[in-house]
Amino acid sequence: MPHTPDRPRRIRVQRDGPLLIEGPVEVVDENGEVTASHRFAVAICTCRRSRMFPWCDTSHRRRGRRPCEGGPEGGPV
């Protein structure tokens, strides 16, 4: 469902995955650079493994979890 003034933009949070955001979106990085997508939905990388960062390219699926990402070695999830 598209974003409208009376309906907030929806963001879906997935454990061990990207943020799924209803588009279109503009992402501003720490240097102030703006990256835009006009798709109806986008996946934003949260693990920083993507070669297309800030967009998710599913690189998180090819590698194991880092110890700092939760679980017994990394503390609470």
Image: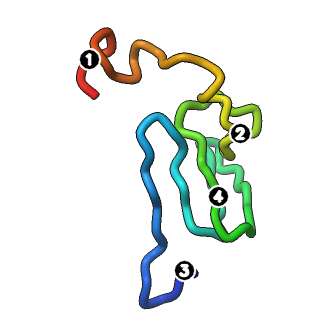
Residue located beneath label 3 in the image: 1
Report whether 54 appears left or right of 77: right
Which image quarter: residue 41?
Answer: bottom right
What residue type is disc 1 on? Gly
Across and down, in percent, residue 50 comes to 69, 33
- Mark 3, other Cα within 10 Å: few <14 / some 14–19 / many ≥20: few
Question: How far, Cα to Cα, is label 1 from label 4?
Answer: 30 Å
**If you read the primary sequence from the N terminus, does the residue marked by circle 2 or circle 3 appear first?**
3
Q: Quadrant of the image for the N terminus? A: bottom right
Task: Check the image and name the residue furthest to the top.
Answer: 73
Across and down, in percent, residue 10 comes to 46, 68
Question: How far, Cα to Cα, is label 4 from label 3?
Answer: 14 Å
- Mark 2, other Cα within 10 Å: few <14 / some 14–19 / many ≥20: some
Q: Residue at x 54, y 31 (%)?
A: 47
Residue located beneath label 2 in the image: 57
Residue located beneath label 1 in the image: 75
Residue located beneath label 4 in the image: 42
